[in-house]
Amino acid sequence: MSQAAENGEAGPGPDATTEQARSAEQAARIAELEDLRLRALADLDNMRKRCAAQVSRAEEEARAAAARQWLPVVDNLDLALAHAEADPETIIEGVRAVRDQALDVLARLGFPRRDDRGARFDPVRHEAVASRPDPGAEADVVAEVVRPAYGEGDHQLRPAQVVVARPG
């Protein structure tokens, strides 16, 4: 008889073998899950890099598209400078045409010029640079636009700088 049998100890029985097999299975499953986790992290990092590259490309394309819209304006300014010796009225007419062209580009880009004269003062849309008494005007009405606004709502390049009327 063996020493373990003599002491009343049982040898590795079916329970111990089953426990070892279960432990080995769990270790294999843990290794498999760890591998899956590392692969998922690598996939996530690759996706993050792809998205960053796509965003960068989209920003570059948007800037290039906006710049292309400004090229005719620059071309016309060059033409105006080339004919600087022309009649002053012709130069003024040309500058007005280029200005209109520039305003059209801003409008196409989603930032139309706003004329807020007579509108009620709105701190989201207007920046008050002064106020002046105006006996015939309502309170808090834009009496004069110092610098016009471009855009609407959340898509505003800048608010209008205005002089606000106050009843006299």
Image (cartoon, grey):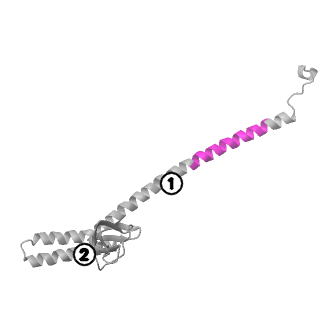
Q: Is residue 147 visible?
A: no
Specify start and end residues of the magenta stretch as a single range.
20-40
Q: Amino acid at mark 1?
A: Met
Place of residue 125 in the rendered image (x, y in percent of width and height, measured from the top left): 37, 69
Say left or right for 133 vs 47.
Answer: left
**Viewer-side residue, 52 vs 106:** 106
Q: Residues within 10 Å of mark 1 (few under 14, many from 20)?
A: few
The quarter holding residue 81 reads bottom left
Q: Is residue 40 visible?
A: yes
Determine the main secondary structure of the stretch shown in magenta.
helix
Q: Which mark is residue 101?
A: 2
Residue at point 19%, 70% (across, down): 75
Residue at point 11%, 70% (across, down): 82
Say left or right for 8 vs 152.
Answer: right
Where 1 sits versus 40, above or below? above
Place of residue 117 in the rendered image (x, y in percent of width and height, measured from the top left): 30, 76
Q: Earlier in the sequence, mark 1 or mark 2?
A: 1
Place of residue 110 in the rendered image (x, y in percent of width and height, measured from the top left): 36, 72
Which residue is labeled 1 in the image? 47
Q: Amino acid at mark 2?
A: Gln
